[in-house]
Amino acid sequence: MNTKDIIQLSDKYVMHTYGRIGMAPVRGQGARLWDADGKEYLDFVGGLAVDSLGHCHPAVVNAIREQAGQLMHVSNLFYIEPQAKLAELLVQNSCFDRAFFCNSGAEANEGAIKLARKYAWKKHGPGKSEIITAIQSFHGRTLATVTATGQAKYQQGFEPLVPGFKYVPFNDQAALAESIGPQTCAVLLEPVQGEGGVNVAAAEYLTAVRELCDRNGALLIFDEVQCGLGRTGEFFAYENFGVEPDIVTLAKALGGGFPIGAMLAKAEAANGFAPGDHASTFGGNPLACAAGLAAMQAMLEEGVVENCARVGAYFKGKLNDLAGKYDFIKEVRGLGLLLGMEMTIEGGSIVNSCRERGLLINCVNNNVLRFIPPLIIDTSDVDRALDILETVLQEKN
């Protein structure tokens, strides 16, 4: 099938929940994608931060093939070897003690919300159930996680929302101090807000949040679904700030392209759940965990995180050079290879023009170009992307 055929078939039979781009990728390798018509693209979207090892990393492909030929699914009523090994790897490379596996970032955040409330109920009794999140946050599309999301545009039409959530400005210690209280069971934050415009938390802000949570008997939850697992130049985003949360949520990069999510918790918080309190039929299945184990081993053993830090710094420097040349570029921000370029003009046409020239990028909040490429890219990939981007920017100048 060619691109036109695929688009026609999809438009006829697939529910219209996405404003889809008029291309149909059919093959990927590393940081390259090819569409159904054979056109090649440099992929700086990376499956929305999923393809951190690039497309079709050999270790992940081989793990999936081998596991699929042995055992794809059994119930969590049984012990599952790849699940245990992946939990061990994540715990031994973090400050956490236990893992819960699911299928997506939304499910991971849903689990964290439930764990925080159940922990508070067991420890403090009824009434301590409020969860505070940040304006411009994004935590998922389930009813609870869309309620947790501090952006009204994602909530409109889904009312009534889940009660017990409160929103405060991001990076505003005073606002949080005013809002937190005896009724607060948790504060849920992204160390770097991805969908909200690539907004990076200040280290002193997260330190203050940690102290406020401790003072009020509330758990601190970091949503690292997008910014975790190497994306910021550290394996976990919290390592950039010297602040340890009680719970962290993960997904996107965890499976190397295969769907899997996880919630990690320190022992005290993890004890909030007992058998029967939470579950996921497909969560932590052998196939997903085999993919996740291979992906995380590759990330830790092949210098991927270090490459992200090095190439990310180079990329950010080059984007700042562009900001010095074009008045409509307001700010460049981000960590590692989660970078944003805020502009005073809309970014949609820039994204389209870059795609026509063979570069895939993304735009959030209408005017923030977001760059979330595979963490395996090198400086030559960055230079090629910047050549295309600057060609397009010159047309806007």
Image: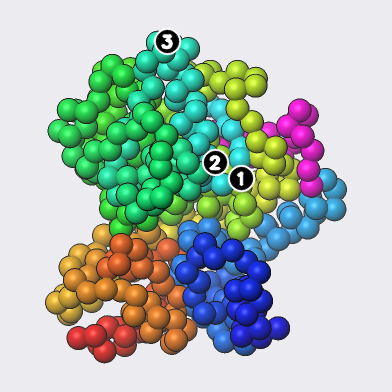
Residue at disc 2, secondary structure: helix
- In which quarter of the view is residue 369 placed? bottom left
* Residue ID for mark 3: 125
Residue at 60% x, 22% y is: 277
- In which quarter of the view is residue 298 placed? bottom right
Q: Position of residue 115 (x, y in %)?
A: 49, 26
Is residue 361 placed above or below 136 in the rendered structure? below
Distance CA(mark 1)–CA(mark 2): 7 Å
Residue 371 falls left or right of residue 97: left
Task: Identify the magenta region.
Answer: 72-91
Dot in front, 1 or 3: 3
Please state, as top left, top right, bottom left or bottom right, where the C terminus lies in the image.
bottom left
Residue at disc 3, secondary structure: loop
Q: Name the amino acid, label 1.
A: Asn
Residue at 61% x, 83% y is: 3
Using a 10 Å C-alpha cutoff, classify the residue at mark 1 as few (fewer than 14 neighbours), some (14 to 19) or many (20 or more).
Answer: many
Q: How many marks?
A: 3
Is residue 155 placed above or below 344 in the rendered structure? above
CB-based contact (under 8 Å), mark 1 and mark 2: yes
Residue at disc 1, secondary structure: loop
Earlier residue among tags 1 and 3: 1
Q: In front here: 68 or 147?
A: 147
Q: In front here: 157 or 362?
A: 157
Is residue 104 placed above or below 97 in the rendered structure? below
State the mark number for residue 221. Answer: none
* Residue ID for mark 2: 107
